[in-house]
Image (tube, grey):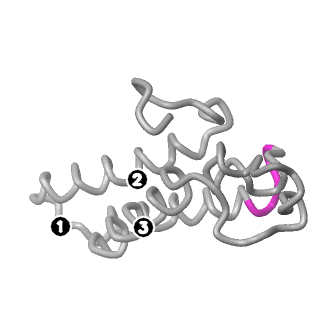
């Protein structure tokens, strides 16, 4: 479960929270909008940036469930593996918080 948790964290962080723009036209960002989506990550574009929607809650719950499964299956003496799980899940979970909308830590990825 640790491999799945860390793999999911890496893939979703880069796909949802790092890469800007939209690879396809959506119904809320069209070609005629003047590339407004180019300034936002995919997570910022989900559900027209409304917070607390079922889609956003589902994505957040997936992170929590994967973390719980990874922690439950990690042997008690493996503290390094536990730290890896905590860091991987925390980075993705914190990036999904509403307070982090349009926030760029230390100006990275502006």
Q: On screen, 87 above or below 26? A: above
Q: CA distance from mark 3 to mark 2?
A: 12 Å
Alpha-carbon neighbours of circle 1 within 10 Å: few (<14), some, or many (≥20)? few
Q: Which residue is mark 1?
A: 75
Residue 68 spot, x, y in % from top left: 43, 62
Q: Quadrant of the N terminus?
A: bottom left
Asked whether the residues under the numbered discs 3 and 2 touch, taking CB atoms below 8 Å apart as contact, a structural biologist would say no
Element under label 2? helix
| Disc 2 packing (10 Å; few <14; some 14–19; many ≥20) | many
11 and 66: which is toward the camera: 11
Residue at 14% x, 52% y is 79
Q: Which mark is residue 89?
A: 2
| Magenta region | 51-55
Q: Nearer the viewer, mark 1 or mark 2?
A: 2
Along the line of sight, the residue nearer the viewer: 95 or 77:
95
Residue located beneath label 3 in the image: 11
State the separation of the CA atoms marked 1 and 2: 18 Å
62 in the magenta segment: no
């Amino acid at each position: 479960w640790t491999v799945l948790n860390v793999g999911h964290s890496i893939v979703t962080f880069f796909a949802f929270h790092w890469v800007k723009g939209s690879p396809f036209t959506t119904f809320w960002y069209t070609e005629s909008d003047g590339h407004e989506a180019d300034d936002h990550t995919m997570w910022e574009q989900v559900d027209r940036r409304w917070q607390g929607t079922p889609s956003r809650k589902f994505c957040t719950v997936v992170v929590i469930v994967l973390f719980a499964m990874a922690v439950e299956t990690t042997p008690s003496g493996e503290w390094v593996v536990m730290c890896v799980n905590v860091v991987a899940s925390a980075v993705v979970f914190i990036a999904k918080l509403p307070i982090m909308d349009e926030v760029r830590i230390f100006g990275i990825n502006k």
